[in-house]
Amino acid sequence: MQEALKSLLLSLADDLLVIGHRNSEWTGMGPVLEEDIAFASMAQDKIGHALAFYELLHSLGEPEPDILAFTRQAADFRSCQLVEYPIGEYDFSLVRHFLFDYAYTTRLEALKSGSYAPLAALSERFLRELKYHTLHARTWVAQLGNATEEARLRMQSALNEALPMAYGIFEETPHTAGLVAEGIQPHEQELRDRWLAGISALIAGTPLKLPQPTAGDIRPYLGGRQGRHSEHLQPLLTEMTEVFAIDPAAAW
Amino acid sequence: MVTEAHIRNLLRVVKDPEIPTVSLVDMGVVHRIDLPANGGVHVELIPTFSGCPAMSVMALEVEQVLRKAGFAPVTVAMNKQVAWHSNMISEEGRKGLLEHGLSPPPHYDPNTQDYALEAATCPHCGSTRTVLKNPFGPTLCRAIHQCLDCQETFEQFKPV
Ligand SMILES: [Zn+2]
């Protein structure tokens, strides 16, 4: 059981560490100063969450959080592929933030009432902070989705690109069944359906269209949960590791 | 006989570095105080916002204050299993927030956790006709609102 639990914690922590570092790349680059601050704040929260999950792993006998975060290679990361892609244009980062944060919220809601108490406690705390992240995401998605025709087209194309990546958040692993049996979390499919219901309702309030998973329309980006990643993850990890090697205390 | 209340009083000098008008006792982050028979003190703090950089500074200060007061050994630990929420800020703490120009977070029911992030009271004129301009302010714990009556932009300590 311990192994299944560890794999869940690792995938949570890795997702947050990677997306946190990606989104911190918007510092000084956002379309407006407020967005710089928002992305930096959300990145700070997520890296804080990652640290807490690594600490929980450490309490279960895994190495120190620093070692877990900054010394592993891409193949050892259990993050989904969605989080590792470069920040791209603002539309892509915004849509990714929207899809990821609603998925993360759905997962924490489930873990909060799951059977593993330390994780349930963390989930409850993080959900309160996440409310602001999802508020930010849905406000901007609605704003840009309803803005000019060009903005709408750009948002739609970002959504088409990011949705199949986001499906990979819910990749089943050989450990999933064990987690379900222990009452720690529901099936990934179940989480994905809850997530889809939530974001569908929000997207329905905008002129945007959620790509439908019919006739092979959506090819989920799978493999991340098993350590298979795009070429984009390793360079990011190398950069994070270099910062860590220069000043271990400053890395977080 | 040293009591928990005595330690709490001592710790009132430790302020949140980002909000110097509020002590960490009033912030509600002093979760537990143990007074073992060996003359030492063990303090357990709970973090406010997960990514808050001020927490480690405050933990260090707690240790120093208690050492100076003659306690040994002094240990300070972060308990991340307990969820802090903004209802834990005391009345004194809410006054301190206002003094610092921050609108205190509205009280909410922690069971339903059903609260409007958009609701705030203007610290300048007291109006509740306000709009949320940005859920992220200069620090993790602050959001930016604007008052529709006096037109001032103000910061709110977020309800979480
Ligand atoms: Zn006002």
Image: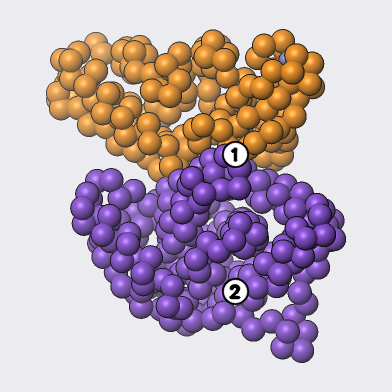
Chain colours: A purple, B orange
Q: Position of residue A251 (x, y in %)?
A: 30, 50
Residue placed under numbered mark 1 in the picture: A34
Task: Provide the secondary structure element on which disc 1 rests.
Answer: helix
Q: Position of residue A53 (x, y in %)?
A: 40, 56
Q: Which quarter is ligand 1 in? A: top right
Write down the chain letter for disc 1: A
Q: Are marks 1 and 2 in contact (CB under 8 Å)?
A: no
Q: Is residue A46 visible?
A: no
Asked if residue A133 is positioned above or below residue A215 in the image, the reply reads: above
First in sequence: mark 1 vs mark 2: 1
Q: Position of residue A119 (x, y in %)?
A: 47, 55
Q: Is residue B154 visible?
A: yes
Residue placed under numbered mark 2 in the picture: A165
Mark 1 CB lies closer than 8 A to ligand 1: no
Write down the chain letter for disc 2: A
Q: Amino acid at mark 1?
A: Glu
Q: Position of residue A158 (x, y in %)?
A: 67, 67
Residue A213 occupies quadrant: bottom right
Q: Quadrant of the N terminus of chain A?
A: bottom left
- Bin the neighbour count of mark 2 within 10 Å (Cα to Cα): few under 14, some 14-19, many 20 and up: many
Asked if residue B130 is positioned above or below residue A228 in the image, the reply reads: above
Residue A236 occupies quadrant: bottom left
Q: Residue at x 45, y 16 (%)?
A: B22
Task: Provide the secondary structure element on which disc 2 rests.
Answer: helix
Q: Amino acid at mark 2?
A: Met
A186 relative position to B147: left or right = left
